[in-house]
Amino acid sequence: MAQINYRVNQEIKIPQVRLIDSNGEQVGIVSIKEALKRAQEQELDLVEIAPQANPPVCKIIDYGKFVYELQKKEKLQRKKQQVSILKEIRLHPNTDTHDFDFKVRHAINFIEEGNKVKVSVLFKGRELAYTELGENLLKKFIERMSEVAKVEQEIKFEGRTMHTILTPLKSKKKK
């Protein structure tokens, strides 16, 4: 959790600050002594919320409540964030039809969970002479997945592997 350290009360060492009172109304530019005095009168804290401003902006609030609200906002943002994981399915040029169907079913499950799927065809030894078999296998895989996924990255050949990346057609709403 990325925690920003805010200077509070006596930690603020500048001569003047732009003050916002506990109601959220702007008081104006006042001395740090005046700002601290106002905060103490209300039994609240003086928190520097915008140190980069000129003069820095300070607000009279309950520091504990302020930190709690920040953590709540951060937690809500993380909750709304969409996390996409890249799952990999490996094939060989001579993969049997049953194995192929089994791997397609797994890929469909991954896509329905909202993950991306990288489909790779691995070539060993002399299989490199039959790269068109691998390409046909990937095209067949893409065709079988066309109802639930679209191609994010076209078929690419790198070293001894040929691969493509598929993404879900629509993002799944988790409840």
Image (cartoon, rainbow, N blue to C red):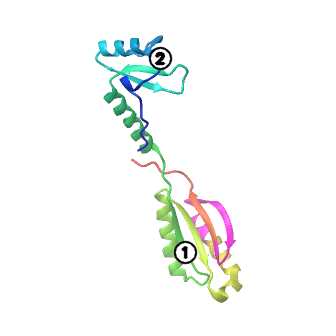
Real-space Cα separation, disc 1 to disc 2, in angstroms = 65 Å
Which image quarter: residue 156?
bottom right
Q: Residue at x 34, y 33 (%)?
A: 68
CB under 8 Å between discs 1 and 2:
no
Front-most of residues 4 and 65? 4
Q: Position of residue 149 (x, y in %)?
A: 57, 60
Mark 2: give few (<14), some (14-19) or many (20+) Cα within 10 Å: few
- Residue range (magenta): 141-162
Q: Position of residue 121 (x, y in %)?
A: 61, 76
* Residue type indicated by callout 1: Arg
Q: Is residue 161 within the magenta segment?
A: yes
Q: Is residue 37 above or below residue 13?
A: above
Residue 141 visible in image: yes
Q: Position of residue 109 (x, y in %)?
A: 46, 64
Residue 21 visible in image: no
- Provide the residue designation for mark 1: 90
Mark 1 / mark 2, whichever is N-terminal:
2
Q: Residue at x 42, y 31 (%)?
A: 6
- Provide the residue designation for mark 2: 15
Front-most of residues 92 and 75? 75
Residue 128 is left or right of residue 141, and the answer is: right
Residue 76 is left or right of residue 140, and the answer is: left
* Residue type indicated by callout 2: Pro
Q: Residue at x 44, y 40 (%)?
A: 77
Q: Residue at x 43, y 42 (%)?
A: 2
